[in-house]
């Protein structure tokens, strides 16, 4: 049995390598209309991870999809795609790509096993290229072997793979389990695939049967042991959640190693593309959606949600803030509790400290947005822009009806409804004149009291 730390003999640099990714699964156990490999992990389809990592190791990638899986084929582009029209098992799926094997070495990977690292793929390929190795496979030693197929070893070589249902008690006690990923010379792989049959209860062609064909050919079969977290398959919503937890752990560690403080790491959820520059601080229960870039020195307080936004540097966000796509928060700006920004640029040093909605707006540097301010940016058909000038002061509970421009250094009186542009340095009052009715409140209460007494 070999591990990733073994010394290996590399093949000539000219020898090509091809990764075949099986991605035709319908996700029946997930009870979903979405193809299994399109389910998301940290904001990206699981197939994306496998293609990205395989691209760092293999010269060519071929993706096997099912019929009518245009979204999977689009994700696979520009790599080659072949279609498995009849789903007759993993061996049958691999056969569909035989014409694309080419020369050199071929590895068959599973799209629903997306977390295999480039290092593990390199180790698999290197083991295959060791003198005397006919077939290399990935194996793991899970904490709970459960019903995984067991890898039976003899003198450091794989003797056979035995499925849990067919295993003896002694074989079920084996801790080394099959992950299903195989790598062999292209010509050998084609021959072994063509020799397997579907003489089983399911009437399917199983890729794992290639191991028996290699052993029968007298070829050396070697196992490369990799961490369980890399090799876990995803066949259900519960397993998807377990994989998400693994990805989140990796992302959190990478963020902290990169200089970000996560006050309570397990409560922070990141996307695969989240960028947190050094000296950022993220408080508990913060969620990052896709497309977030947080610059150095920014602090994001608890229970905030950030998606499609650029923030900072040295900005303060939250608690309970929501930054939606298209938002750009400038240096040392402040976005406070229960403030929502969408497609809005908040200039350097500007403040929107509480209870505010700004949509399709541009706010100049140093402006102050009072509590309860909203931009009315949508008329039911079109979105309209609001421009708020630098160093302006928007009074509490102002309603800015777009399209409208508030000039630099301008001021709006609290409670105003602004429907027209305000010149630079001007003050706008857009509210009804107050009228006091003497004694009316007492009279009103007396009327209510009499009605109540009369039943």
Image (cartoon, grey):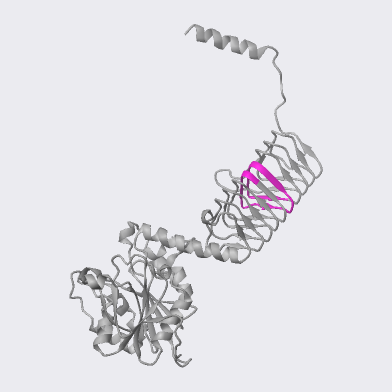
Please identify the quarter of the rendering in which residue 24 is found: bottom left
Q: Is residue 388 left or right of residue 33?
A: right
Q: Is residue 342 magenta?
A: yes
- The residue nearer to you, when weighing 337 against 450, is 337
- Could you tell me residue 60's position as x and y percent? 44, 82
Q: Is residue 4 left or right of residue 203?
A: right
Quadrant where the N terminus sits is bottom left
Q: Is residue 284 magenta?
A: no
The number of callouts visible is 0
- Could you tell me residue 321's position as x and y percent? 60, 47
Q: Which residue shows up at 28% across the image and 66% down it?
A: 147
Q: Main secondary structure of the magenta part?
A: strand
Q: Is residue 64 left or right of residue 298?
A: left
Q: Which residue shows up at 54% across the image and 62% down it?
A: 252
- Could you tell me residue 239's position as x and y percent? 37, 60
- The residue nearer to you, when weighing 282 against 1, is 1
Tell me the magenta residue range: 336-363
- The residue nearer to you, when weighing 12 against 340, is 12
Please identify the quarter of the rendering in which residue 253 is found: bottom right
**Residue 392 sits above or below residue 20 on the image:** above
- The residue nearer to you, when weighing 264 against 441, is 264
Residue 66 in sight in this render: yes
């Amino acid at each position: 049995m070999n591990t990733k730390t073994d010394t290996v003999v590399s093949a000539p640099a000219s020898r090509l390598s091809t990764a075949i990714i099986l991605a035709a699964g319908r996700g029946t156990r997930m009870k979903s209309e979405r193809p299994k490999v399109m389910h998301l992990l940290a904001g990206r389809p699981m197939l994306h991870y496998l293609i990205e990592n395989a691209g760092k190791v293999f010269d060519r990638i071929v993706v096997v999809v099912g019929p009518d899986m245009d979204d999977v084929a689009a994700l696979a582009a520009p790599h080659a795609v072949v279609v498995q029209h009849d789903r007759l098992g993993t061996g049958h799926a691999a056969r569909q790509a035989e014409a694309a094997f080419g020369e050199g070495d071929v590895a068959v990977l599973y799209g629903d096993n997306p977390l295999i690292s480039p290092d593990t793929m390199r180790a698999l390929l290197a083991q295959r290229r060791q003198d005397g190795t006919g077939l290399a496979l990935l194996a793991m030693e899970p904490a709970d072997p459960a019903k995984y197929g067991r890898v039976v070893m003899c003198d450091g070589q794989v003797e056979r793979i035995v499925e849990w249902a067919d295993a003896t008690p002694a074989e079920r006690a084996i801790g080394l389990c099959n992950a299903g990923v195989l790598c062999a010379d292209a010509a050998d792989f084609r021959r072994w695939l063509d020799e397997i049959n579907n003489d089983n209860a399911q009437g399917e062609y199983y890729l794992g049967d290639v191991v028996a064909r290699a052993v029968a050919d007298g070829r050396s079969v070697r196992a490369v042991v990799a961490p369980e977290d890399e090799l876990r398959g995803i066949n259900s919503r519960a397993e998807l959640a377990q994989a998400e937890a693994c990805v989140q752990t990796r992302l959190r560690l990478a963020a902290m190693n990169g200089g970000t403080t996560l006050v309570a790491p397990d409560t922070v959820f990141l996307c695969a593309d989240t960028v947190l520059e050094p000296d950022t601080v993220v408080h508990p229960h913060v969620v990052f959606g896709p497309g977030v870039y947080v610059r150095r020195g920014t602090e994001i307080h608890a229970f905030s949600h950030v998606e499609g936004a650029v923030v900072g540097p040295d900005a303060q966000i939250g608690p309970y803030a929501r930054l939606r796509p298209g938002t750009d928060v400038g240096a040392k700006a402040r976005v406070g509790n229960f403030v929502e920004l969408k497609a809005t640029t908040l200039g350097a040093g500007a403040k929107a400290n509480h209870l505010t909605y700004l949509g399709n707006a541009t706010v100049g540097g140093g402006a102050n947005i009072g509590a309860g301010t909203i931009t009315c940016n949508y008329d039911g058909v079109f979105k309209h822009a609001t421009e708020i000038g630098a160093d302006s002061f928007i009074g509490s509970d102002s309603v800015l009806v777009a399209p409208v421009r508030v000039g630099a250094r301008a001021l709006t009186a609290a409670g105003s409804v602004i429907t027209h542009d305000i010149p630079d340095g001007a003050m706008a009052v857009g509210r009804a004149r107050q009228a006091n009715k003497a004694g009316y409140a007492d009279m009103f209460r007396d009327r209510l009291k009499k009605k109540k007494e009369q039943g």
